[in-house]
Image (spheres, coloured by chain):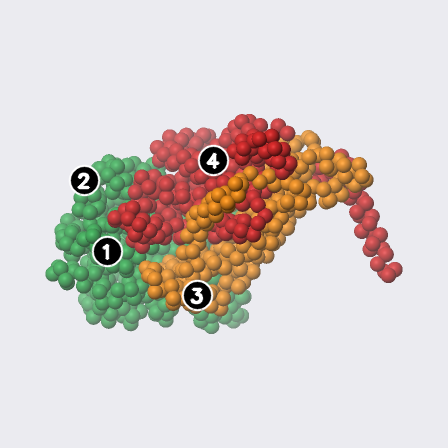
Chain colours: A red, B green, C orange
Amino acid sequence: MSGLRPLRVSVAYLGQRLDQISDGPRWPYILVGPAFLLVLIVSVWPLVLAIGISLTDYVLTRPNDERLFVGLDNYAAVLANPVFQRVLGNTVRYVAIVVSGQFLFGLALALLMNRATRLDAFARGTLLLPWAVPGVLVALMWAWIFDWRSGFLNGVLQSVGVIDAPVAWLADPATAPAAVMVAAIWSGYPFFAVLLLAGLQAIPRDLHEAASVDGASAPQRFWSITLPLLMPSIFISTVLMVIWTFQSADLIYVLTGGGPGYATAVVGSHAFSIMFRQLDFGVGSAIGLMMVLVSLVFAAAYVRVSGVLRQ
Amino acid sequence: MSISGTGREARRLRFSGLVVALALAASACGGSATGSASPEPVGSSQPTADSSTPPEAVTIEFWHTYGESAIPWVDEQAALFKDKFPWITVEQEPVPSDVFMTRLITALQAGGGPDVILTSRDQIAPLVAAEALLDISAPIAEWEDREQIPEEMWAGGSLDGAIYGVPIQTYLEWMYYRKDLFDEAGLAPPTDWDSMLAGAIALTDPAQQLYGFGMRGGSGGDSQIMQWVEANGGRILDDEGNVVFDSPETVGAIQWFSDLKTKYGVVPPSAVTDGFQEVFAAFEGGNTAMLIHHTSSAQRVRDALGDKVLSIPIPAGPVKQVGYVDPALQSVISTSENKEAAFEWARWWAELDTQSYWFDKLGYWPTRLDTAEQTVANNPFYDAARETLEKSATRGPSFPEYSEWRTASVIPTFQQVLLGELTPAAAVTQMAEALKQLRD
Amino acid sequence: MRRPTSLLRYLLYAAACAFALTPIAWMFIGSVRPDPTVALSWDELTRFTLAHFEELFFRTDFPRLFANSLMVMALTVIVTLAMSVSGAYALSRFRFRGRAVLVVAFLLTQMIPSILLLVPLYVMLQAAGLLDSLFGLSLGYVAFSVPVAVWLMKGYFDAIPIALEEAARVDGASRLGAILHVIIPLSWPGIAATAIFVAITSWNEFLFAALFTSGTDSRTWPVGMQLFIGEFELKWGVLTAGGVLSTLPVLVFFVLIQRRLVDGLAGRGGGVVG
């Protein structure tokens, strides 16, 4: 046993030192240092690079000596482009509806699943499955559901008698946006359900018990106890989902390619196309940075309105 | 039935003339590229020729978009290749086609990237403009089998007289049609716009979910549009590279094509956004009677429909008959560190046996004339392809901005015409404007 | 009061499950049908086959790629949790200089669209020799998961009253001890939710994996599945089979963790409905 003694002494010493450090003033910096360093590396340099490139006429298919400084020309060109304006409008509407839908459905489920029974455990596993499905299959699944020829939706609606001829859901500008939104809501609601469910756990049960003893009904308790205490979870999940959805493009690309016309075109795929098809890195970077700016403005406004950081 | 003798002879004469011309041109300008990256042309010395010591072992990386099924086949070819070139190891990297350009451009920008890639017509132009591909005119000029591949195929991989890819498979656009349905209706296979429209109208029966033509309004549908435009006498660019898309001929073609949906209703309701999967599912599932695609799908269509389907050249327009014929190519990356080895692998794909192998596996029309004789020559299903080669073969659009133009402008704008949101004239003006901006 | 709400609960669950499961059912059915491309008919349901799964296991790179994804997911979750628990604790409990900057910076990483990240990350990974490596890919995932995880967990930590920690320290525990014995046990739901999020994100991630890995040594399963969509055919059978198997690890992970998600230990978790 004497061979182990040095080891035990060192571990005990290490533990003691850690305890000491954790009480010291440098502790927060040690805790947060590695994360901050990573963030610095993967965000600062790409941003700086992007800013630089966006101010030049950097088109891969044009000779090197033509990649001159053009100031804000790229930004002006993008903003003046009517296609981009339409696409931006589409994207804002898409994000608003999709995130709202995901949030509402996720919240409803979180409230529903907030029990420890076996049924609820089973339900939790089942209802969160959409989140687990890989992206390539999510798109194919919904392409099948909305398919004109042999799709599930047409099949069901026809056999029930709601429609008498199959509808081309993805080919009609009146229905295509809604169709892709439904697919997106399906894919993303579990994110909210899980996070909000975890947030619900932080609400002490005695608050609810005290309130109902005082005669508050379930809806009253929801609005005055649950919702306010859930705000931090709501805030973080919605701001993240808005940011991500604003950039997303894959699902729409497979389902409609942005069509018909420009009905379902979003900024994410537009940016990709400019950068990696037109090979215009200057304009592509400008679009990317504008996306960052939009997200930043949104987050800042949201923080202010929700007062979340005032703790 | 094989390719007629006189045609072949004439081609041979043209080949030799062209070979001499190209060899002179190659030696004159030495394959130098403009701009910062000056890739060295592959030297004219054959690796096996005169060295007493064996060349040092190299590994080259090959990127392709054939998908998962082809992985073992490419491995087989790499093994056969290694038998002949023991010092070269080929590592294949199958890349999902959706991210191929993204991955390639990212890697090249970062100073990395593969040695050989599989490319197609619309990638050649931007990649050459970005100085990403190696000029292989010199070693090709010395290749003894060069004449086995027709000049049109070499042209498909060339820009400004320099060759940037070895043509290995032919994408020849043609039309499949339901012979059984046409026979039943007493119709001859369509040969021009009028008979095509008549056939489509006769065979359309919405109650049976049957439509005359499987229009591809979604991704990839630009090919059809452009062929109709050219068939009506329209052009995208003139010889100086100016945008001349906005013309009465172009408007006429867009009018005729969009009328199929807006006026006659002979295309499925989903046609506006139908892409590859949808148009094939519809055709193979019996919902459409005519479908335009290229020869690579011949096998799957025949598997699905058997004798019910036959192929014909794309119907002629009022001015001419157009069928795009473009090759798939093996290209060497200009910044490759093993250019000779990379070129050997690229050229390997144009060998007789290799081409036969891939015809077996994929059914793609080979580029070599001798392979074509062995594989498709006696197959009546490919009559239409031979006819196209003789009469209507045209090179598809090939300029750097085409890829973005068709995705961001042509397809969505044409969809707007189909939806009735734009008139053909307004649409053509919009598309032409967009192209001018991209080329600015 | 009990019976009607139970019935309501069942009905709501049924409706929600129908919505959630229909597309997934398509995937399951497609994976066992002999020919998934033909229209579905009733008698087909009796003719199911495991041929696609067999092909997946024995004639594709599935085993290797699946294992790769598992390793990346495990590494990413562990490292991310370690870094973000500590980071979130610092942001939640301390008022130090640069705190606001950090909070914003973490959120900023999420706002950068991938088009701006691809080339710089490629350059960095290449320079560090971490291209085509599972470790490099995990590192990339960690770099982008940590900011989110910190934000998520900060919220859950914020909800734990400081009084509890102070009580523990009065009893003689150090800060580290308070973290280990008070904070973490109380925030299991938050940690579980964050872990699930990181696991799913890294498991299903496609773009970075497609660009930064090469060969079967480092390719992950999402890329492998995308390769079933080839130039000339879409292999529905193996693709759906692969999708079915792809949901399993996440499902397993979730089943293991979900007990923590609904934690009734501290008398918490307000049941609002019914």
Q: Which residue is mark 3?
A: C52
Subunit bearing disc 1: B
Q: Tell me where residue A102 appears, x and y as whole percent.
A: 47, 41
Q: Quadrant of the C terminus of chain A?
A: top right
**Residue under disc 4 on the same chain as residue under disc 1:** no
2 and 3 marks in contact (CB < 8 Å) = no
Where on the picture, by quarter, is residue B253?
top left
Q: Secondary structure at mark 3?
A: helix
Q: Quadrant of the N terminus of chain A?
A: bottom right
> What is the CA distance from the residue labelled 4 to the residue labelled 1?
42 Å
Tell which of B140 and C39 is nearer to you. C39
What crowding class fits label 3: few (fewer than 14 Cα within 10 Å), some (14-19), or many (20 or more)?
A: many
Q: Secondary structure at mark 2?
A: helix
Q: Which residue is mark 4?
A: A291
Where on the picture, by quarter, is residue B366?
bottom left
> What is the CA distance from the residue labelled 1 to the residue labelled 3?
30 Å
In the image, B26: left or right of C72? left
Where on the picture, by quarter, is residue C170?
top right
Subunit bearing disc 3: C
Q: Secondary structure at mark 4?
A: helix
> What is the CA distance from the residue labelled 3 to the residue labelled 4?
42 Å
Mark 3 belongs to which amino acid? Answer: His
> What is the CA distance from the residue labelled 2 to the residue labelled 1?
30 Å
Q: Which mark is residue B288?
A: 1
Q: At 21% across and 57% down in the image, what residue appears?
A: B289
> What is the CA distance from the residue labelled 2 to the residue labelled 3?
53 Å
**Residue under disc 2 on the same chain as residue under disc 1:** yes
Mark 2 belongs to which amino acid? Answer: Pro
Where A63 sits versus B378, above or below? Answer: above
Mark 4 belongs to which amino acid? Answer: Met
